[in-house]
Amino acid sequence: MDALISLLGPFWGWIGGAAAIVIGLFGIYHKGKSTGVQQERTKQETAAAKQQMGDRISVWEVKDDVAKRDDDQLLDSAAPWVRNKQGGRSP
């Protein structure tokens, strides 16, 4: 054991330096990984917010369209989705 320690004696500085470099590289890797996760989370939240805003605008447009129509126009436009075979109007 003493022979091994005496053999590695001149290299302790190099071993310590290499260990410091490995620890530094691990720190850089970990920092980059956490930054990438945060960027992806922000990107997904932004995309979800844009989608929600588009959905809200669509709802507003439909509500405005429905508010502008009278009952007969609403029945005619709903005819394709109604089971009544007379175009949505009662006899």
Image (spheres, rainbow, N blue to C red):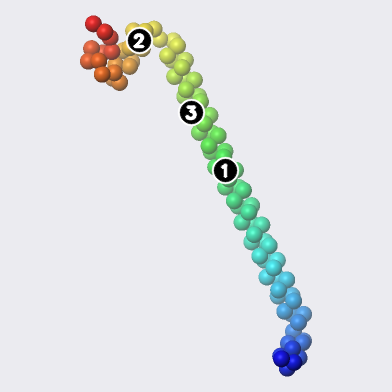
How far apart marks 1 and 2 lie (CA) works out to 42 Å
- Is mark 1 in CB contact (under 8 Å) with mark 3? no
Work out whether 90 lies above or below 79. above
Report whether residue 46 is seen: yes
Looking at the rendered structure, the secondary structure element under dot 1 is: helix
Query: Picture quarter containing residue 85?
Result: top left
Q: Which residue is mark 1?
A: 43
Furthest-bottom residue in this view: 3
In the image, residue 74 sits, relative to residue 33, either above or below, namely: above
Kindly indicate whether the residue at mark 2 contacts the one at mark 3 (C-beta within 8 angstroms).
no
The span from disc 3 to disc 2 (Cα, nearest Å) is: 24 Å
Q: Percent position (x, y) of residue 11?
A: 74, 84
Farthest residue to the front: give it.
1
Q: Quadrant of residue 84?
A: top left
Q: Quadrant of the N terminus?
A: bottom right
The answer to whether residue 7 shows anywhere in this view is: no
Q: Kindly check if marks 1 and 2 are in contact, taking CB atoms under 8 A apart as contact.
A: no
Give the numbered dot on residue 73.
2
Of callouts 1 and 2, which one flags the residue occurring earlier in the amino acid sequence? 1
Residue drawn at 74 percent across, 80 percent down: 14
Q: Quadrant of the C terminus?
A: top left
- The answer to whether residue 82 is left or right of residue 13 is left
In this rendering, would 88 be left or right of 40? left
Residue at position x 62%, y 48% from top? 38
Q: Which residue is mark 3?
A: 55
Q: Quadrant of residue 68?
A: top left
Residue 45, image x, y percentages: 57, 40
Rendered location of residue 52, percent (x, y): 52, 31
Mark 3 or mark 2: which comes first in sequence?
Answer: 3
Looking at the picture, does residue 33 appear above or below residue 67? below
Residue ID at (70%, 75%): 18
